[in-house]
Image (cartoon, rainbow, N blue to C red):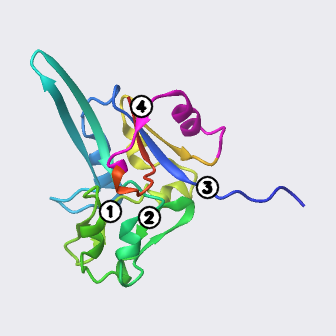
């Protein structure tokens, strides 16, 4: 009898000091997941703060935050939005009615209505992760700005990275316990 099996908690860290806003992650996601023209599951934000000449710029690759307390899951009347392996928040397309309750409840604007009528969003490429691969966005990043892994594994690269670097989450006031972190 071995040690009890530990549940995984998938997360992503995005290094804002390395990102050059090239959009390789966005293009890889579109190709991997057949995202229709005019839509995206992840996007680049370029934020400038301060007043000249004391300006600070930050590039961020943003997506669904796969929240541990996801309001979209609670808002979904059909159960289409749900938690999957590793805490990844998914949408079962054939259960989704396109009512947009989940879209309205998401503080990260991470969902869109697919032209076929269901809501779609980032899946952390769970189909790839189950095969032992990294999400498509992580594999193509030319500056290695994106790190993906299991937060419940203290030896994982992401756990070590978050333990050693200052980081933030977007909209902490929403109380969603997001699993996408931005390194500063």
Q: Tell me if I can see residue 52 in this picture.
A: yes
Residue picked out by circle 1: 121
Q: Nearer the viewer, mark 4 or mark 3?
A: 3
Q: In the rendering, which numbered label is found on residue 8?
A: 3
Q: Position of residue 62 (x, y in %)?
A: 30, 46
Position of the N terminus, as image quadrant, is bottom right
> Mark 1 and mark 2 in contact (Cβ < 8 Å)?
yes
Question: Which region is colored magenta?
Answer: 153-172
> Mark 3 and mark 4 in contact (Cβ < 8 Å)?
no
Whole-Å distance between the Cαs marked 1 and 3? 21 Å
Q: Nearer the viewer, residue 33 or 69?
A: 69
The answer to whether residue 23 is left or right of residue 139 is: left
Choose the circle earlier in sequence order: 1 or 4: 1
Residue at image x 31%, y 30%? 19
Q: Is residue 166 magenta?
A: yes
Q: In the rendering, which numbered label is found on residue 144?
A: 4
Residue picked out by circle 2: 89
Position of the C terminus, as image quadrant, is top left
Choose the circle earlier in sequence order: 1 or 3: 3
Choose the circle earlier in sequence order: 4 or 3: 3
Choose the circle earlier in sequence order: 2 or 3: 3
Q: Secondary structure at mark 2?
A: strand
Q: How many marks?
A: 4
Specify few, some or many for label 2: CA neighbours under 10 Å numbering under 14, 14-19, or 20 or more: many
Whole-Å distance between the Cαs marked 2 and 1? 9 Å
Specify few, some or many for label 3: CA neighbours under 10 Å numbering under 14, 14-19, or 20 or more: some
Choose the circle earlier in sequence order: 2 or 1: 2
Residue positioned most to the right: 1
Whole-Å distance between the Cαs marked 4 and 3? 23 Å
Whole-Å distance between the Cαs marked 2 and 4? 24 Å
């Amino acid at each position: 009898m071995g040690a009890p099996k530990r549940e995984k908690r998938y997360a992503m860290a995005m290094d804002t000091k390395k990102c050059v806003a090239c959009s390789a992650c966005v293009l890889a996601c579109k190709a991997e997941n057949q995202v229709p023209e005019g839509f995206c599951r992840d996007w680049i934000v370029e934020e400038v703060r301060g007043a000249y000449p004391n300006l600070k710029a930050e590039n961020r690759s943003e997506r669904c935050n796969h929240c541990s307390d996801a309001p979209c899951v609670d808002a979904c009347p059909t159960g289409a939005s749900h938690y999957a392996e590793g805490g990844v928040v998914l949408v079962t397309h054939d259960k989704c009615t396109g009512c947009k309750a989940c879209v309205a409840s998401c503080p990260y604007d991470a969902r869109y209505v697919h032209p076929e009528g269901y809501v779609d969003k980032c899946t952390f490429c769970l189909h790839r992760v189950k095969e032992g691969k990294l999400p498509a966005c992580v594999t193509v990043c030319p500056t290695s700005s994106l790190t993906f892994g299991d937060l419940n594994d203290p030896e994982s690269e992401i756990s070590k990275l978050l333990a050693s670097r200052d980081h933030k989450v977007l909209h902490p006031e929403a109380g969603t316990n997001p699993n996408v972190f931005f390194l500063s």
